[in-house]
Image: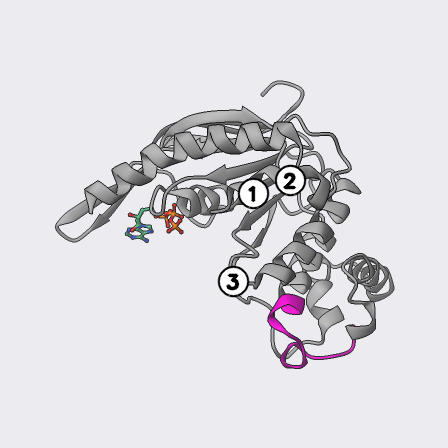
Amino acid sequence: MDGAEKIRVENLTKIFNTGRTSVVALENVNLTVEDGEFLCVVGPSGCGKTTMLRILAGLEKPTSGRVYIKARNAGKPPTAVVFQGDSIFPWMKVVENVEYGLRIRGIPLEERRAIALEYLKKMGLERFADLYPYQLSGGMKQRINVARAFASDPEILLMDEPFGALDEQNKLILQQELLRIWEGSYKTTVFITHSIDEALLLGDKILVMTAQPGRVKAMLEVKIERPRDIILIKSSPVFIELYREIWELLREEVMKARNMR
Ligand SMILES: Nc1ncnc2c1ncn2[C@@H]1O[C@H](COP(=O)(O)OP(=O)(O)OP(=O)(O)O)[C@@H](O)[C@H]1O
């Protein structure tokens, strides 16, 4: 891998065999993500976005091809994943949830507690540290998931529609918080979303995938300066132009996906 590359996906194909049928979820996907880059992935439903993320997380094996993640530090976990649903442990306090990854790695209590509290503070949740998840709203739980992923300090962050289930106002707040926390770390991130808006707000690059089987349709660069402001960005000419371009690319694929059903 070359010096700036953090993730390399090479000729990745994934076929699911289920009884009599087989589904080609991904076909010959090639891409690279540079160190410190935020990649957003958009594509029609069923085009293999989650499958690709699960392969990057090591939760699923490729049928053929490879993924490489360049590790800088042998002590760090290769990935941390934030899914759409609620995946925090109900029997642990908020702060214990956030420090969980560090605890698994044997980081002493005092050190891991300080890190967890720092990320809770960044997500505006410091005062809820000693509560249990059932005492929190859905939006707050998702903020805990994000704080936990950053606190575990992985080589790369993987997010699968983390804000997909939230209402519009909560989504805006979490996007803004994610931007702030990410712009303080520049952690290599792959973020799946159905929303072109969200991809443009967050991403340095946007991967547009084809309808099933999922292939790379386009890789676009979002040349909008950071730190970004969600409200200002939406009225910028770059945003409007890229939105149109991505929608044109996606519309073709969404129509294809509809005709396949
Ligand atoms: N474990 C599995 N067994 C069989 N088929 C699967 C499995 N996981 C995914 N698939 C199929 O692979 C294809 C890609 O699924 P995937 O969930 O990756 O798509 P997606 O782009 O994330 O979809 P969505 O946007 O709706 O979440 C789909 O046709 C799906 O039914």
Outermost residue toward the top? 2
Q: Is residue 105 magenta?
A: no
Residue 207 vs 165, above or below: the answer is above
Q: Nearer the viewer, residue 81 or 207?
A: 207
* Crowd around label 2: few <14 · some 14–19 · many ≥20 (10 Å): some
Q: Amino acid at mark 1?
A: Asp
Where does residue 110 sit, x and y in percent of width and height?
Answer: 87, 64
Q: Which residue is mark 2?
A: 234
Locate residue 147 relative to residue 49 in the image: left or right.
right
Where does residue 93 sit, x and y in percent of width and height?
Answer: 71, 76
Secondary element at image label 2: helix
Mark sitting earlier along the chain (3/1):
3
Q: Are marks 1 and 2 in contact (CB under 8 Å)?
A: yes
- Image quarter hosting the N terminus: top right
* Label 1 vs label 2, nearer the camera: 2
Mark drawn on residue 165: 3
Locate residue 249 relative to residue 206 in the image: left or right.
left
Q: Which residue is mark 1?
A: 197
* Crowd around label 1: few <14 · some 14–19 · many ≥20 (10 Å): some
Q: Quadrant of residue 248?
A: top left
Mark 3, ligand 1, within 8 Å: the answer is: no
**Residue placed at 40% from the left, 27% from the top?**
217
Residue 90 vs 81, above or below: the answer is below
The span picked out in magenta is 129-141
Q: Is residue 212 visible?
A: no
Where does residue 210 sit, x and y in percent of width and height?
Answer: 35, 33
**Residue placed at 72% from the left, 72% from the top?**
94
Mark drawn on residue 120: none
Q: Are marks 3 and 1 in contact (CB under 8 Å)?
A: no
Q: Are marks 3 and 2 in contact (CB under 8 Å)?
A: no
